[in-house]
Amino acid sequence: MEEKLAKVLTFVKADDPLGIREREILELILAAKRRKEIAEELHLSENTVKTYTRSLYSKLGVTCREDLYSLLLQK
C-alpha cells in the first residue's frame, strides 16, 4: 500500500499539496473503498467525501478513479 501511495503522490502538483483529509481519502481509494465506505470510516457525509475527492483528483490531474489507478501503471 505504501508503494502505491508514494507513486501516486509523485503526481501531486508541488505548489498545491494534499491536505490531511485528501491524503486519508486517497489511501482509502487505493484500498478499493467506495465513497460510502470512506464516509462511514471517516465519519463524514458522502457529499463531503465527494468534495474532497474532486479536490484530490484536481491536484493529481485526473478526473476519475480509473485515471487515478492508471497513475500506478506509469513509470
Image (cartoon, rainbow, N blue to C red):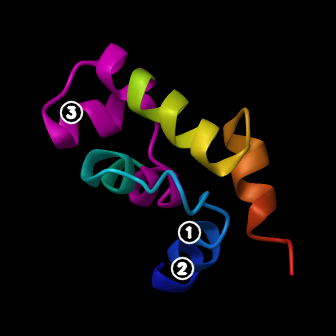
Mark nearer the N terminus (2 vs 3): 2
Number of marks in the rendered image: 3
Residue under numbered circle 1: 9
Choose between 41 and 49: the one closer to the eye.
49
Magenta residue span: 26-50
Question: Closer to the observer: label 3 or label 1?
Answer: 1
Q: Report the residue at 81% width, 58% height from top.
A: 70
Closest to the observer, 39 or 54:
54
In this rendering, the answer to whether 48 lies above or below 17 is above
Q: Nearer the viewer, mark 2 or mark 3?
A: 2
Q: Are marks 2 and 1 in contact (CB under 8 Å)?
A: yes
Viewer-nearest residue: 17 or 57: 17
Q: Is residue 37 magenta?
A: yes
Q: Please say if 56 is above or below 30.
A: above
Is the C-beta separation of discs 3 and 1 under 8 Å? no
Given the image, on which type of amino acid does mark 2 rest? Answer: Ala
Horizontally, is 9 left or right of 74 in the view?
Answer: left
Amino acid residing under circle 1: Leu
